[in-house]
Amino acid sequence: MKTIQLLKTAGSIACVAFALNATAQTSTSPPPATSESIGQHIDDSTITTKAKADLLAAKNVKSTHIHVKTQHGVVWLTGTVPSADDKAAAEQVVQGVDGVSSVKNHLKIAAE
């Protein structure tokens, strides 16, 4: 019985110490000017996931080698596609995703 009480007390102390440490870190150092909020990070992750899903579903894009990254609503496409048509189609598909402000298409056309 004493062991359970000891574990509860130790756990409570650890939680308080963690909370105080987290509060001290956030209140003494302002975030960098270029940091993104948690909401923005979630939005960017949602855009990236939706863009990848739409690329995989698109019948006019061979998207197995396309990498998608999103930051502040701007989507970067990197990787390789087999043709210029695939490159243009991939950009068009991603531009249609909700929340996308612009697309930076850095896809390379694979040598045939």
Image (cartoon, rainbow, N blue to C red):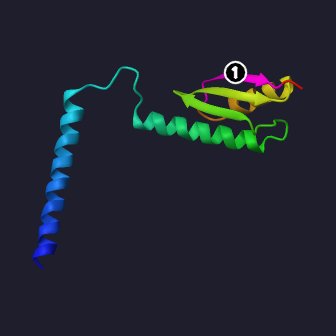
Q: Which residue is at a point 69% across and 32% down the rendered structure image? A: 94
Name, please, the residue furthest toward the left.
2
Is residue 93 positioned above or below 104 on the image? below
Q: Which residue is located at x 82 percent, y 26 percent?
A: 110
Q: Residues within 10 Å of mark 1 (few under 14, many from 20)?
A: some
Location of residue 92 by image quarter: top right
The x, y position of residue 2, in whole percent, is: 10, 76
In this picture, which residue range is highlighted in magenta? 100-110
Q: Position of residue 17 (x, y in %)?
A: 16, 48
Q: Position of residue 74 (x, y in %)?
A: 58, 25
Could you tell whether 100 is left or right of 10 in the image?
Answer: right
Quarter that holds the N terminus: bottom left
Q: Quadrant of residue 100?
A: top right
Residue lying at the far bottom in this picture: please name it. Answer: 1
Mark 1 element type? strand
Check disc 1 and report the residue beneath it. Answer: 106
Q: For the view shown, which residue lies furthest in the right direction?
A: 112
Type of amino acid under label 1: His
Residue drawn at x 53%, y 35% as measured from the top left: 44
Look at the image and say whether residue 50 sits in the magenta stretch.
no
